[in-house]
Image: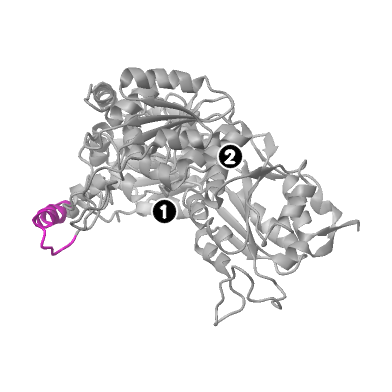
Amino acid sequence: MATRRLTMAQALVLYLSRQYSRRDGRERRFFAGTWGIFGHGNVAGIGQALQQYDTELRYYQCRNEQAQVHTAIAYAKHLNRTATFACTASIGPGSSNMVSGAATATVNRLPVLLLCGDIFAERIQAPVLQQLESEHSPDFSVNDAFKPVSRYWDRIYRPEQLISSLLGAMRVLTSPAETGAVTLCLPQDTQAEAYDYPAEMFEKRVWEIPRNRPDVALLQQAAAWIRRSEKPLIIAGGGVHYSEAQDALLQFASKHGIPVTETNAGKGALPYDHELNLGATGHTGNFAANECTREADLIIGIGTRYSDFTSQSNSAFQNPNVRFININVAEWDAYKQHALPLTGDALVTLEELSQALGSHQTSQQYQARAAELNRSWDEEVHRIYHLEHEPLLSQGEVIGAVNAFARPQDVVLCAAGSLPGDLHKLWRTREPRGYHIEYGYSCMGYEIAGGMGVKLADPERQVYVMVGDGSYLMMNSEIVTMVQEGIHVNIIVLDNHGFASIGGLSNAVGSDGFGTKYRYRTESGHLDGETLPIDFAQNCASLGAAVFKAQDRASLQEALQSASEVQDRPACIVVETDRRERVPIYESWWDVPMSEVSEIATIRQTRRQYETERTRMKHYLKSNTADD
């Protein structure tokens, strides 16, 4: 058998360069490259291999290990999980900086490969610089922290172990049901050890991404439930996008007259102005979607994991006879809410379910009500877009200005703070991939790095990153990377002088925004002094971005035009907003427990209200098999 003598790191890099994915006959390279920051734990192994095979697998230099994972996640999400990046970091703090990124990937079911520098396999040198020792086991490092946030984890002690480990890693990375973060821990000495690897290991390999189908009997039972339902309702989750089922959903909803609501991950499943699209559902939802969700007798969840924001902490579904049908590639999610589980790909399942339903439609009255709610909600969006709030713009007005300026094919991106909730409600999505919100983990700092990932995945689109000052200050480092790579992304920084989202929640639970405003500490010992004078425009400029400032609607429109004309670097628009002018929550609720006893009167008052609202929470245990 022909072999190639390579170090473990060289074999790893060469193998990754030869991996491809294919779905519906469309083939692409699975790894677009490798992001990395080098230290003693990976520079002589993985670093040397990336240098040697730079034409096979491009290396990208980043500024923050967590940010590089966010970039890979956004890239994978925009390409519906058919491609990603690998990310490498050194032992200790370098690798552990990627833990939050790994969790973000796994929570959102998005593939990313993490190559973590590790301790020496031979242990003679122990303890090495940046090693976390354990007196209970020498087989331990900070990389063990990746175990709960990875879908596949391995430590490669011997170079030949790489062969079987890579097969396991690729199986998970390309699995529609099991994908997430894959972590390979690479001891420093093992990276540099040579082995005679089988030559066929480095031949091109194409991983077919399957479209699995649900059980036929359960499919027929689901059709029977839908026929008997008077008020069925679809909740479209991220799985609609990942399976590219938007057209199938449009045809299904239109043919059978079933209204659609959207989670944050599912937004854009239908155009915002489709008469059956009720828009955002859940705690960050609107009155149209939440009203119909409350009354529905049958919920058809498609590609959703029913997070507490979507289910309003299991208080959203109030019809005493409500049942659930779940279409999901992951069996775990398909069974949630004691649902009738259609474990399968969303696209093919919708097609087969529609065929089983034949010409069945809901009543014209029900469809007309959905259309009227769609129009009523759009009128509310128009009102918020044009508040004419003074002296500062409201956040809703900024969203409206960006939405009006952006083309249908352009992308808005966000992750944390109050912006994702407001965007979920207010953004008028016209194309499926025009809305990119990481809200499974809602990881602060995702935004700027994520915007770069989307731009790398789809260079023809303008990307509008909307980020609050809190997330901006946590991680703005990849502005430098975009300057280095000549990548243009529009970054709109909303300066609201603190953590506005959690400040609003703090007010709602009676704590008066404690610890959420950017203010000086005074002689009283409290953070209640003057607002901190942070110059975000100067900061963006110092990192190499083109910078524009906006004070009102007219100057914001001018800034958007100027920013869009920048081509070879990121453009930042800084606009101050009024954190007190908030978008309503529209009859939604979310379980945030507050103190049962307190010396603060406002907390005692909100606790009484909380106990009343909590009575709406339910367990959904109605039979998922009975036909009556």
Residue farthest to the right, as pictured: 1
**Which circle's residue, 1 or 2, is located before the other in the chain?**
1
Rendered image: mark on residue 335: 1
Q: Which residues are magenta?
A: 595-613
Q: Nearer the viewer, mark 1 or mark 2?
A: 2
Residue 415 horizontal side relative to residue 344, left or right: left
- 280 or 411: nearer the eye? 411
In the rendered image, the vertical position of residue 143 relative to residue 619, given as above or below: below
Q: Main secondary structure of the magenta part?
A: helix
Q: Which residue is mark 2?
A: 481
Q: Callout 2, which amino acid?
A: Thr
Q: Is residue 243 visible?
A: no
The outermost residue toward the front is 523
Q: Quick check: is 518 in the magenta stretch?
A: no
The verdict on residue 610 being magenta is yes
Task: Residue at 51% x, 40% y: name it.
Answer: 450
**Measured along the vertical axis of the image, is residue 467 above or below residue 427?**
below
Q: Is residue 434 left or right of residue 515?
A: right
For the residues labelled 1 and 2, say whether their Cβ atoms are less than 8 Å apart.
no
